């Protein structure tokens, strides 16, 4: 592609992107296609001869777009958000144009040095102590895998990488049943095995880890010849926003010399607001923490921050230096590829720099505070309506509920039918989880451009469908 054509299509793409963001609120939030609808429109083979950009772009609009779910839609209340503030999308356009592979300091010094600076900015913004350093990872899953690998190597006296796990005492990691499935995967991938992931009971509305039970489990494992290595705590579990008493968990874990990793992938962004930091009190004693600015804060996907107390342990676990990666004479600089499992690294710090400078922390705090307020508003409206039942109260901007039938009872089939009807309608998008075995609907407010009117629309749609379902029941 020649420069003038590259310019033409880059301008078209940027214009298309801006118009898309302007108009996205008029589209159904969740894609309304059936399985295979898109696949059957894709040519079975690549073309032998190049095609025109006009045709390629037209196909993008007609074939691909109907199959997209709109994560930047202001009424995306499903899962957690994957916010990409327009300013961070602008930074990503630049990163896309540069297309640098930033694995080592010398493969783009600006990328490494800006990354170090952004880790410092975010650490301070979240109120974490200055001894934390860290890096930007592609996902919380990778950060948690890093943490589990360090737990393993520390516990094995740094011999796991060379000798493997055969003949070693079984390593034990402790967590609850509220944590994300990325923890299970990290346990599988690290060779520790899910049989050695010990689920500690939880208690209270927060469904936090019972620290006494943690202590008892570690003691009992030591007596039985296991090798306790670490604890994975959470602030804001994915299902209902469960949170552990980090201070209590750290006290027990550190008394036994165990490593503590805190998963705050979603809720971590809220910690730019000092009034929410009580939810993770004690976090300053953790050994590592992960949070995703690509979820709630507004940094274009992907952008996950792993804060770590002891980068030496991580580098000792992951660094590998074949001749072709040695950076002659530049020792002392950070090569962030030694801080992660993948070698290659995108330039992820630029979008954070643009985002934080353009909106300022006060701008981002205002957004998060609004989301928390509006989620409470929706929860109140449903709590006061006898056709709904609240299962878990809002933790930050997440709560769960379910629709009731006329008799005031409900079942999974009714909840699923209600959810499907809402998502087929398309004005709002919600997803489900289970609370004490029952199917329930999650509501989280968090999209970057959401307004109070969008919260009102959510209430309106939910009540409208409660009415429709009641009528259908009467008609049988
Ligand atoms: C989303 C989420 C994850 C996984 O995040 P990825 O970046 O997609 O790997 C892990 N933990 C929690 C609590 C989450 O909400």
Image: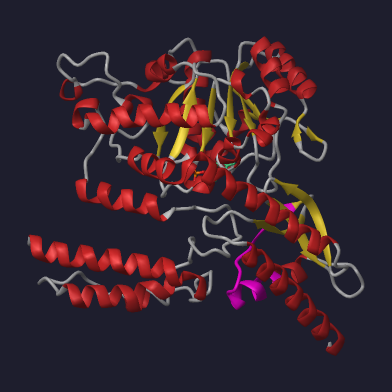
Whether residue 462 sits left or right of residue 283 in the image: it is right
From the image, which quarter does the N terminus lie in? bottom left
How many marks overall?
0
Picture coordinates of residue 395, whole percent (x, y)? 71, 45
Picture coordinates of residue 371, whole percent (x, y)? 63, 52
Give the residues drawn in magenta, as a range.
Answer: 417-434
Is 27 placed above or below 152 here? below
Is 444 placed above or below 26 here? above
Looking at the rendering, the quadrant in which ligand 1 lies is top right
In-front residue for pair 95/251: 95
Is 371 placed above or below 127 here? below
Single out the residue that lies furthest toward the left. 2
Single out the residue that lies furthest toward the bottom. 475
Is residue 100 located in the magenta-colored stretch of the structure? Answer: no
Is residue 429 located in the magenta-colored stretch of the structure? Answer: yes
Picture coordinates of residue 133, whole percent (x, y)? 44, 22
Single out the residue that lies furthest toward the right. 407
Query: What residue is shown at x 57% (from left), y 52% (from top)?
Result: 80
Query: What residue is shown at x 44% (from left), y 12% (from top)?
Result: 158
| Residue 346 picture quarter | top left
Q: Let me know if residue 227 appears in the view.
A: yes
């Amino acid at each position: 592609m020649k420069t003038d054509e590259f310019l033409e299509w880059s301008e078209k793409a940027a214009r298309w992107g801006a118009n898309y963001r302007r108009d996205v609120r008029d589209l159904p939030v969740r894609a309304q296609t059936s399985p295979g609808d898109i696949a059957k429109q894709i040519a079975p083979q690549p073309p032998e001869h190049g095609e025109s950009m006009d045709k390629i772009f037209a196909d993008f609009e007609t074939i691909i777009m109907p199959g997209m779910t709109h994560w930047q839609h202001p009424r995306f209340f499903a899962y957690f958000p994957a916010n990409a503030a327009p300013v961070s999308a602008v930074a990503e356009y630049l990163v896309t144009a540069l297309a640098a592979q930033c694995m080592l300091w010398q493969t783009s010094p600006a990328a490494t040095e800006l990354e170090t600076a952004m880790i410092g900015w975010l650490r301070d913004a979240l109120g974490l102590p200055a001894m934390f350093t860290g890096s930007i990872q592609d996902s919380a899953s990778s950060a948690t895998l890093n943490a589990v690998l360090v737990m393993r190597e520390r516990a094995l006296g740094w011999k796991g990488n060379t000798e493997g796990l055969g003949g070693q005492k079984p390593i034990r990691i402790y967590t609850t049943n509220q944590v994300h499935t990325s923890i299970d995967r990290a346990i599988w991938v690290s060779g520790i095995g899910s049989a050695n992931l010990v689920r500690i009971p939880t208690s209270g509305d927060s469904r936090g880890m019972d620290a006494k039970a943690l202590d008892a489990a570690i003691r009992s494992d030591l007596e039985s010849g296991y090798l306790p290595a670490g604890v994975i705590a959470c602030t804001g579990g994915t299902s209902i926003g469960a949170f552990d008493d980090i201070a209590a968990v750290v006290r027990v874990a550190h008394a036994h010399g165990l490593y503590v990793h805190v998963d705050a992938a979603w809720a971590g962004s809220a910690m730019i607001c000092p009034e929410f930091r009580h939810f993770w009190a004690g976090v300053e004693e953790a050994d590592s923490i992960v949070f995703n600015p690509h979820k709630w804060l507004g940094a274009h996907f992907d952008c996950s921050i792993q804060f770590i107390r002891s980068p030496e342990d991580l580098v000792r676990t992951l660094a590998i230096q074949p001749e072709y990666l040695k950076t002659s004479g530049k020792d002392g600089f950070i090569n962030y590829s030694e801080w992660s499992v993948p070698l290659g690294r995108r330039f992820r710090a630029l979008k954070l720099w643009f985002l934080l400078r353009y909106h300022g922390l006060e701008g981002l705090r205002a957004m998060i505070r609004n989301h928390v307020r509006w989620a409470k508003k929706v929860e109140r409206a449903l709590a006061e309506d006898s056709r709904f039942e609240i299962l878990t109260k809002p933790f930050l901007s997440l709560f769960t509920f379910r629709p009731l039938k006329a008799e005031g009872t409900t079942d999974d089939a009714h909840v699923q039918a209600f959810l499907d009807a809402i998502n087929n309608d398309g004005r709002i998008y919600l997803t489900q989880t289970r609370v004490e075995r029952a199917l329930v609907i999650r509501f989280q407010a968090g999209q970057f451009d959401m307004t109070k009117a969008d919260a009102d629309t959510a209430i309106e749609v939910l009540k409208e469908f409660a009415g429709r379902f009641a009528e259908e029941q009467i008609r049988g």
